[in-house]
Image (tube, helix red, strand yellow):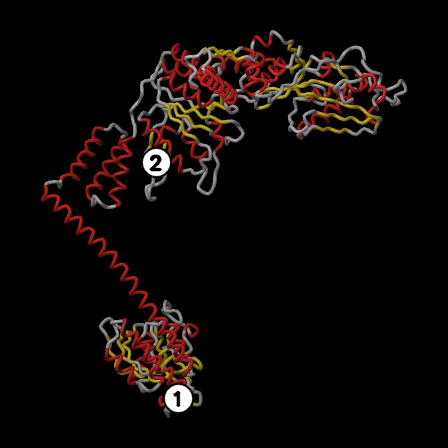
Amino acid sequence: MILPKIFKHDEESNANGLTLPLLPLRDIVVFPCMVAPLFVGRSKSVKALSNAMNKDKRVFLSTQTRAGINNPRPEDMSDVGTVGNVLQLLRLPDGTVKALVEGKARGRISRFIDNNDFFQVEVAPIIEIGADGPEIISLMRTITKNFHEYAKINKNVSKELVNNVSAISNPSQLSDTLAAHFAFKIEDKLHILKIDALNERLSYLLSLIKMEIEVVQMDKKIKGRVKDQMEKTQKNYYLNEQMRAIKKEMGSEDEVGDDLKDLEKRISKKRMSKEAKSKVKDEMKKLKLMTPMSAEATVVRNYIDWIISLPWYARSKVLNDIEKSEKILDEDHYGLEKPKERILEYLAVQTLVKKVRGPILCFVGPPGVGKTSLAKSVARATGRKFIRLSLGGVRDEAEIRGHRRTYIGAMPGKVIQSLKKIGANNPVFCLDEVDKMSMDFRGDPSAALLEVLDPEQNYSFNDHYLDLDYDLTDILFITTANTLPEIPLPLQDRMEIIRLSGYTEYEKYNIAKDFLIGKQIKLNGLANSDVQFSKNSIYTIIREYTRESGVRNLEREIASICRKIARELVKNKSDNTFKVTTKTVQKHLGPARFRHSLAEEKDQIGMVTGLAWTQVGGELLCVETAIMPGKGKLTVTGKLGDVMKESAQAAVSYVRSRAERIGIPTDFYDQVDIHIHVPEGAIPKDGPSAGISMCSSIVSALTRKAVFHDIAMTGEITLRGHVLPIGGLKEKILAAHRGNIRKVLIPKENEKDLKDIPASVSRQIDIVTVEHMDEVLSHALQINPEGPPLFSKDDVPIEIMAKENESMGGQRSIN
């Protein structure tokens, strides 16, 4: 450990070190043995240099920890630095000073001495440890070797510096020389200056040099890649120019030019909006400036083609003959009066008004009732072209609005694509299965449809690809769905909902007779044969071999019979006359697959016939009630939903509240258990419309009065006995008619729905409207009890089960 010579001075040295003026440095670290020019402009720094020049020219050089501070304080200075000599001082005209300083030795600030003119500090020496030894020699050789490797890949390192470094034998001088010439971070340089152990200092310096080598190598690789890419682009450009020159010599240089001229002619002839015309002209200018074979030119060319291919003002002639349109609609579909009426209304308005926005209709109904085919029939009846877009499973918003042109392979959405394909701006556009859309991270397509299906917005529909406003108001949009709740409410609000209920048996019979049978006879090659289906055979297929709202399965069964007839015709070469009867149906289709409920044959206690609605039509719903000794427990079975269970509880509460009027003890509930069961327990059932049926069944079981077997009922009951309206009345009445029901009780408020009931059905059934449960009981229950009384005069339960079983002998009731 040797004290540096500069600290062995008589005048300014003391027991703790040297007292020197401090020169704060920014963005530079001065090492011992390093000569550096400094430009000094701050007044304190200039005074510090002046003080040093007036004495022994020594100054302490310390780097600021934050370079942006103009007036540093003691805490802003690094505590280590270099004691240096001022070799030269030159004052410049602008007041600044240029100083040439040389670093002499490391030092550490012991304390700051008060001085108002400049910083003055007391500096203690940093004594270096371990100046020799095998480790030091090994580190010096490794550092020198790595520096030579760095000099080979970095052309900015001079040979003179390499030779000087090779000649250095002092480890401290080697570390300071290299640290001064490398562009290390200020923090790293200060750390090298601070380390007093030479082996640690050299190890740290070696790690920094290796990192610099890796950085320079990576920089060369990146520059090489960029250069290769630039050379490739220049090569392509050169080859394209050569091809152009060759084509010019061969006389075919005008092919590209002719193509652009043809494109300009198409643009000038095409009628489009002002915005589109301006946009396509701008894109055409860009295309002319591009190399024809470039990728960007292809993108611009495709964009221009899309714009000029759209039917901006191209329209198909609309048929305004209402009578002819009505005839076409009737030819294609039987029934469906409401949608047909709405289409004819639109045609009537269009005849009176030149410009009318197309309606946005939504056909909602079960599968197979003809929603999509009706939309196609509307196009034929109005003389428009037809587009069908299936939305089932669509989950990407870009399917509707398209992708932006920045994406590779971008295209417009399905709406714009369909219009280009059809070539007309006023088609019938069927958006099929609008309730089957879903959403994920790519967006919500139903939200994108809000603009398409909004008459107040779709005059300026903006596709992401085109980025132009397109008018959709001339399009007659028709959407189809199976269930309404699956469609978002904002989308429902933009459409006119038209419900298509399931076909009745009578309607199915007429559809089969007038449409399906003739179609299948033709498709199965029986056009030249005499194939006749009897009325009973058609009804047999409808009732026993299909259970659906529409007619798809009915058509399949008819097709199956026709195929078997075709096989017999080819096999036996028999007579061309075939009559299809009920026996023929059973022979070809096998045993009946379904059965429809029929009315009970006898009046029974506790057995009431209710009416239910299903997606495939109406059904009879039996409700059974059994009374047994107990303590007031209510049991409800038959796989019933929560709403139906609550209806049963409401019915029991009503009976308890009216017990005296009905003729049973007011405390009967403490003496018996009530079990309500709805047969066919594997089928889920729910809804409030069985309320009056359950109540009638309970009253019948408690009063021992039988319910008429040929009467059916439907309606919701309240605790006060009021009968509330229900839905699906048409299907329920038709089910009652099919089940040989003579009288049907319905809520008074459903009287308005009777106009939908076919006249042939309403003439054969006595439809009675009721407002209160008392009216229901007066129609449903027999006046004279059929079984023994449930309660004695003393209101004590009697043994009724054995007696009732005897009196009810082989009947279907579970009482």
Q: Which residue is mark 2?
A: 412
The residue under the point 35% across, 83% down is 140
Identify the residue at the far front of this view.
572
Determine whether, in the image, residue 57 is placed left or right of residue 525: left
Q: Which residue is mark 1?
A: 132
**Mark 2, secondary structure of its residue:** loop
Quarter of the image where one finds residue 121: bottom left
Q: Nearer the viewer, mark 1 or mark 2?
A: 2
Quarter of the image where one finds residue 630: top right
* Mark with earlier residue (1, 2): 1
The residue under the point 10% across, 40% down is 251
**Mark 1, secondary structure of its residue:** loop
Q: What percent of the width, then of the height, locates residue 629?
A: 84, 26
Which is nearer the eye, 607 or 28? 607
Do the residues bearing badges 1 and 2 touch, measured as CB atoms within 8 Å? no
Identify the residue at the far bottom of this view.
10
Separation of residues labelled 1 and 2 (CA atoms): 77 Å
Q: What percent of the width, then of the height, locates residue 575?
A: 46, 11
Which is nearer the eye, 458 or 806? 806
Q: What percent of the width, then of the height, locates residue 426?
A: 34, 23
Amino acid type indicated by mark 2: Pro
Quarter of the image where one finds residue 502: top right
Tell me: residue 325, above or below residue 246.
above
Tell me: residue 738, above or below residue 29.
above
Quadrant where the C terminus sits is top right
Amino acid type indicated by mark 1: Asp
Q: What percent of the width, then of the height, locates residue 511?
A: 49, 15
